[in-house]
């Protein structure tokens, strides 16, 4: 019995991505964020004994970097064939035409070694991406930035890189959605860079940030460059370079609709200014950051500002006051602890880390050590992309009597 054209198309999608059926199942799970797909189910799809649901097709499209609409159309045709076997011969000619149009482009697609350097081809070069597919890609980019608050870099990496491939594949056919998809691609690339940096691959992080800046230029969207500069500032060669990058980032997010991004850029500038010994500049930037945040709504502005929660603003303030040994540290620490409440929120680990560092640097060693123990437990139970960096900083400031805790944090920081 001849293979069903849709089943063959699904097989070509996998082979074009150079994946085994196990790897394809893993990629689909990475796109969906759920471990529900198995090698056996992928095999059923490729044999034609089962047709994926529309929801699953959305995840397959994301995993393989192809538009959703043609897959939905082909799945519908496959279901019709299953319902009416008596019409197989009449439909064969149309099936061959569809297979030539879709399968031929898939077989000819190219893949590079890294997602940021990959230029995937379209299923059909003559068609434009549909609004539904564009919306899925944009919404998924936003979701990844939300998930960053509660997932480790290692668990995010596959999902972020897979999604970047999906947007890259869609861009040549974006049509009227090109600017929105370019911005979403830049946001995803920036997060991929942040993940790579957290995992210690600084060269890859730099490459991703470069792609983000290119997306910002192409889309005419300066806040996207601010995101790249803000993330890259953590790995700057010296405080002066970090301040230069953050000053540009703050300029890029001036204007309406960027209040949360401005608060983060200015808060980061305050952190770096404090580290460089510029007390006046640090306090001025911190006040500007707080003022901007009074007008901010981190849930409705750019997708990537979702991490700039009130807890994150607390952590920035603690970091500055601790470095400068300001008397406001105690009251700020009490306020931050009160805001955290009894149930530690997703971004609370960062606050605990900055609180521990601030107290230790500010001279409150006993309280700082106590919070450091809390941080150590929270960082392992609630992973995120900032925990390892905080662990390394805290370990360096702990007193000699806390050798075991310092060793534990250093081990955690190198995992």
Image: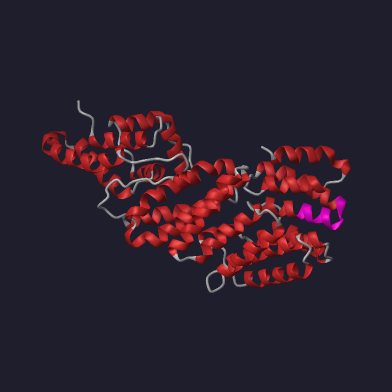
* Left/right of residue 340 with respect to residue 125 in the rendered view: right
Q: Magenta stretch: residue 363 in it?
A: yes
Residue at 73% of width from left, 45% of height from top? 391
Residue 89 x, y percent position in the rendering: 11, 34
Whole-percent x, y for residue 407 in the image: 78, 38
Q: Is residue 92 visible?
A: yes
Tell me which secondary structure the magenta stretch mostly adopts.
helix
Is 408 magenta? The answer is: no
Count of labels shown? Answer: 0
Q: Is residue 371 left or right of residue 75?
A: right
**Relative image position of residue 98 (x, y in whole percent):** 20, 42
In this view, the residue in front, 356 or 248, is: 248
Could you tell me which residue is drawn at 22 percent across and 43 percent down? Answer: 101
Q: Position of residue 363 (x, y in %)?
A: 87, 56
Kindly give the residue lying farthest to the right in the view shown: 401
Looking at the image, residue 86 lies above or below residue 262: above
Closest to the observer: 247 or 337? 247
Magenta residues?
355-366
Quadrant of the snapshot with the C terminus: top right
> Residue at the top extreme?
1
Instruction: Tell me the quarter of the picture where residue 76 sits.
Output: top left
Left or right relative to 226: residue 406? right
The residue that appears at 39% across and 56% down in the rendered structure is 135
Residue 273, above or below 89:
below
Q: Is residue 318 left or right of residue 29?
A: right
Quarter of the picture holding the N terminus = top left
Residue 306, visible in the rendered structure: no
């Amino acid at each position: 019995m001849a293979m069903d054209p849709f089943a063959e198309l699904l097989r070509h999608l996998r082979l074009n991505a150079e994946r085994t059926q196990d790897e394809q199942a893993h990629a689909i799970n990475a796109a969906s964020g759920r471990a529900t797909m198995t090698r056996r189910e992928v095999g059923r799809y490729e044999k034609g004994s089962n047709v994926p649901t529309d929801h699953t097709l959305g995840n397959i499209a994301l995993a393989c970097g192809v538009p959703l609409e043609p897959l939905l159309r082909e799945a519908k045709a496959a279901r019709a064939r299953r319902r009416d076997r008596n019409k197989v011969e009449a439909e064969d000619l149309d099936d061959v035409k569809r297979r030539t149009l879709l399968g031929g482009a898939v077989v000819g697609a190219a893949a590079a070694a890294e997602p940021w350097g990959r230029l995937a081809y379209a299923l059909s070069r003559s068609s434009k991406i549909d609004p539904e597919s564009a919306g899925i890609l944009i919404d998924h980019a936003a979701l990844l930035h939300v998930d960053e608050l509660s997932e480790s870099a290692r668990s995010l990496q596959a999902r972020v890189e897979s999604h970047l491939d999906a947007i890259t594949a869609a861009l040549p056919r974006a049509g009227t959605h090109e600017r929105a998809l370019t911005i979403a691609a830049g946001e995803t690339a920036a997060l991929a860079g942040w993940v790579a940096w957290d995992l210690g691959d600084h060269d890859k992080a730099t490459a991703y940030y470069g792609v983000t800046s290119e997306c910002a230029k192409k889309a005419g969207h300066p806040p996207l460059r601010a995101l790249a500069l803000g993330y890259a500032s953590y790995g700057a060669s010296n405080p002066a370079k970090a301040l230069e990058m953050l000053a540009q980032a703050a300029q890029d997010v001036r204007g309406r609709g960027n209040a949360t991004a401005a608060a983060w850029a200015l808060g980061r500038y305050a952190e770096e200014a404090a580290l460089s010994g510029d007390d006046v500049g640090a306090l001025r930037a911190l006040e500007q950051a707080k003022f901007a945040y009074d007008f901010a709504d981190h849930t409705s502005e750019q997708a990537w500002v979702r991490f700039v929660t009130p807890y994150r603003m607390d952590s920035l303030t603690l970091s500055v006051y601790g470095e400068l040994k300001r008397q406001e540290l105690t009251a700020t620490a009490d306020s931050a602890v009160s805001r955290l409440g009894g149930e530690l929120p997703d971004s609370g680990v960062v606050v605990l880390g900055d609180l521990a560092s601030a107290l230790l640097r500010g001279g409150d060693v006993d309280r700082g050590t106590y919070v450091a123990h809390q941080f150590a437990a929270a960082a392992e139970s609630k992973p995120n992309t900032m925990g390892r960096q905080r662990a390394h900083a805290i370990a360096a400031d702990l007193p000699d009597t806390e050798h075991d805790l310092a060793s534990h944090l250093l081990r955690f920081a190198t995992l």
